[in-house]
Structures are given as C-alpha cells and as structure tokens.
C-alpha cells in the first residue's frame, strides 16, 4: 500500500505506517503514539534509558514526482518552556525498505534547541528522489533529552507557480449587518479555491480594523473558517491570499464588511401592540404570542429573499426554523390588519 498524503492522523494511526526502536534496543518504555483528542498528532516522549534511544516513525512507500517533491510538516518539542538536550530530530529516506535502518539516508536533522527556536514547521527537499518510490522516516534520538511532536504531513509541488487569487469571497465586499455568533463573537468567512493555475496549499488570512494596515491572523488549508473575537457594529477589512511552494498570490483585493448591531440594544420596527416574538437568538423554534390572531408571518434573509411564510390564523404558535442557515433574518408579521417587522438571529 502506498502512503496517502496529506496525513493529519485525524483517523488514528494508519495501519500501513510503522514504528520501532533503534538497533541498540534501548528505549522500549516510549514509542510514537497518537496525542491530542480534538486535533490529533504524533508524539514521542523522552526517556531515561541509560543511553541514546532511537524511536522511528515511518510512512509506507510513496511515489515522488516533480509535483510533490517538497515535504512539509508541523513540529514542536515536547517541552514548551525550554528545550532539553541532547536530542536530535531527523527526517530520513529509504528507497528499499520500511524497516531496514541501514538503508535510510538522513536529509534533515535538527537539535531540540533548533526545533524549539524554529517556526514550528519544516520543509524537506525531496527533488533528488523524483521518479522514485521512497519510505519517509521521522527519527527521534535522545538521551533523556526532549520529546517530539509532529503533524500535518504533506507533499507539495515545489516547482509550482504562485496560485491565482481566491474566488467568491463571503461576506461580499461592503456587506452590512453581518451575523456575529453571540456565543463566541465569531464571524463566518468563506471563499473558493482559485479555479485556474497551480493549486494553493494554504490561505493567509489578512484581517484588521484599519484599511491598508492588515495583520496576518494565520494560514489555513480550509476554505471556510469562523473568526472569533469580533465586535458588534464594527467595520472589518480583510483579504485572503492563497499560497503554495511557488509563492503567494498577487492581486488579492482588500474587502470590508460591517457586523450587525448589538441585538440587546436594537429595537424592532413597527412593533405590534399585544404581539411578542421570542427568542431573538434562535437555534430551532421561534415562538410568538398575540392578543389577536396572527394572519401572516413571513421571514426574509439578509438579501431580502423570502425563506419562510405561513398563514397560522392563531394567537400562539411556534415556527421551526432549524433548516435555515445561521445569520440575521427579518420577520414580518400581520395581525388584525397591522404590520410589524422584527429582527432575529439564527444560530
């Protein structure tokens, strides 16, 4: 079986990968294992075994071509306050065996201090193996030194040209009343991958409150995320910059949107006496009570599109809006000839 990259261990330790200790037999108490729960990774802890231990994590065989000859992965030392030596964290390659240690060649080797002081990511050039099938090993050597955490293995096209710009960004430029989740003050943003050119391997999120002075929040492989910690009634400037081994996209345009007003401070327009709509932040059921029968209830999304309508002819009822997408909606009601408009948030 051939290795499947990218590999993030979200489904546990793959059956076709392998782990083993070095030829001197030291260090049987520790081995590579899955760490974390919500975001799994591979980890190997340090141990005091009376000498230098080797712990091997090895992929199944994989084919290297001109379009996937750059290996990248996330890494950090086990101890995050200070690195402990001696420890060596290396990437090795074999063209013949998954388990014969003597067949492996070291391509990249860093001490615990170098990993600790690094960028938490490493790139290894596999161009010399283009056109060949190889096994890739992550090897921790330590003598009661430091442990090693690795994750998000990917093989990328180092011969790529920079990607084109992202498409169909949302919220749209200039959008207003953009929904903010009350639980974590998050705004949902999304985009489509470039439809032409070499593919992106990640997307830089540029974000700020001042036009032309954006900060990079980070890089994600996803095309939809929730940015937390925003505020009500605030204009946000942002852009998405696709990246790959060939560089960053040029021509990404700064956009802006304004978040919704604080619902606790808002007032409904044309409120109808004797009519009450609740709750204002809804997950599933929207309820209402009225002294007179409700003739018509209609719900519109932020684009003014009708998404629900009914003629209940009742004073008290519930409306199931669980099928609606998260966002801000306008509820228009007609009671005894009077019309009212109410704002709700669907979570």
Image (tube, rainbow, N blue to C red):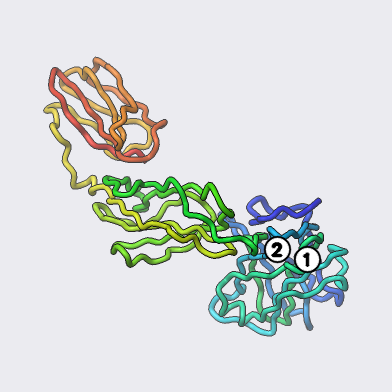
Left or right? Give the position of 97 relative to 263: right
Label 2 or label 1, whichever comes before in sequence order: 2
Rendering coords of residue 196 (x, y %): 55, 49
Q: Nearer the viewer, residue 212 or 235?
A: 212
Helix, strand or loop at label 1? It is helix
Q: Nearer the viewer, residue 169 or 142?
A: 169
Classify 172 as above or below 86. above
Which residue, as the protein is rendered here, is positioned at the far top? 313
Rendering coords of residue 94 (x, y %): 82, 67
What's the residue at 67%, 65% (across, down)?
70
Rendering coords of residue 114 (x, y %): 61, 81
Helix, strand or loop at label 2? It is loop
The reply to whether callout 2 and callout 1 are in contact (CB within 8 Å) is yes
Classify 299 as above or below 223. above
Q: Which mark is residue 129?
A: 1
Rendering coords of residue 167 (x, y %): 45, 48
Left or right? Give the position of 38 relative to 283: right
Q: Which of the 4 quarters of the picture holds residue 122?
A: bottom right
Q: Which mark is residue 69?
A: 2
What's the residue at 74%, 59% (across, down)?
65
């Amino acid at each position: 079986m051939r290795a499947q990259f990218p590999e993030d261990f979200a489904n546990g330790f793959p059956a076709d990968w392998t782990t083993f200790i070095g030829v001197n037999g030291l260090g049987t108490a520790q081995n590579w294992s899955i760490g974390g729960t919500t975001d799994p990774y591979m980890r190997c802890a340090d141990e005091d075994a009376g000498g230098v231990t080797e712990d091997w994590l090895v992929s199944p065989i994989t084919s290297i071509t001109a379009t996937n000859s750059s290996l990248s992965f996330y890494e950090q030392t086990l101890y995050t306050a200070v690195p402990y030596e001696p420890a060596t964290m290396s990437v090795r390659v074999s063209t013949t065996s998954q388990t014969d240690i003597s067949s492996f060649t070291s391509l990249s080797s860093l001490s615990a201090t170098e990993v600790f002081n690094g960028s938490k990511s490493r790139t290894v050039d596999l161009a010399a193996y283009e056109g060949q099938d190889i096994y890739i090993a992550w090897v921790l050597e330590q003598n009661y030194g430091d442990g090693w955490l690795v994750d998000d293995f990917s093989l990328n096209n180092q011969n790529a040209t920079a990607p084109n710009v992202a498409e169909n960004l949302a919220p749209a430029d200039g959008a207003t009343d953009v929904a903010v989740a009350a639980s974590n003050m998050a705004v949902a943003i999304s985009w489509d991958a470039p439809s032409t050119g070499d593919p992106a391997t990640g997307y830089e999120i540029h974000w700020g409150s001042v036009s032309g002075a954006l900060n990079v929040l980070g890089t994600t492989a996803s095309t939809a995320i929730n940015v937390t910690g925003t505020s009500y009634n605030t204009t946000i400037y942002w852009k998405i910059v696709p990246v790959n081994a060939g560089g960053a996209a040029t021509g990404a345009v700064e956009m802006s949107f304004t978040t919704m007003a604080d619902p606790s401070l808002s007032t409904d327009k044309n409120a109808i006496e004797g009519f009450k709509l609740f709750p204002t932040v809804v997950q599933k059921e929207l309820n209402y009570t009225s002294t007179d029968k409700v003739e018509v209830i209609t719900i519109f999304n932020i684009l003014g599109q009708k998404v629900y309508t009914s003629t209940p002819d009742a004073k008290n009822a519930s409306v199931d809006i669980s099928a609606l997408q998260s966002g801000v909606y306008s509820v228009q009601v007609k009671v005894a000839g009077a019309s009212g408009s109410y704002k709700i948030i669907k979570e």
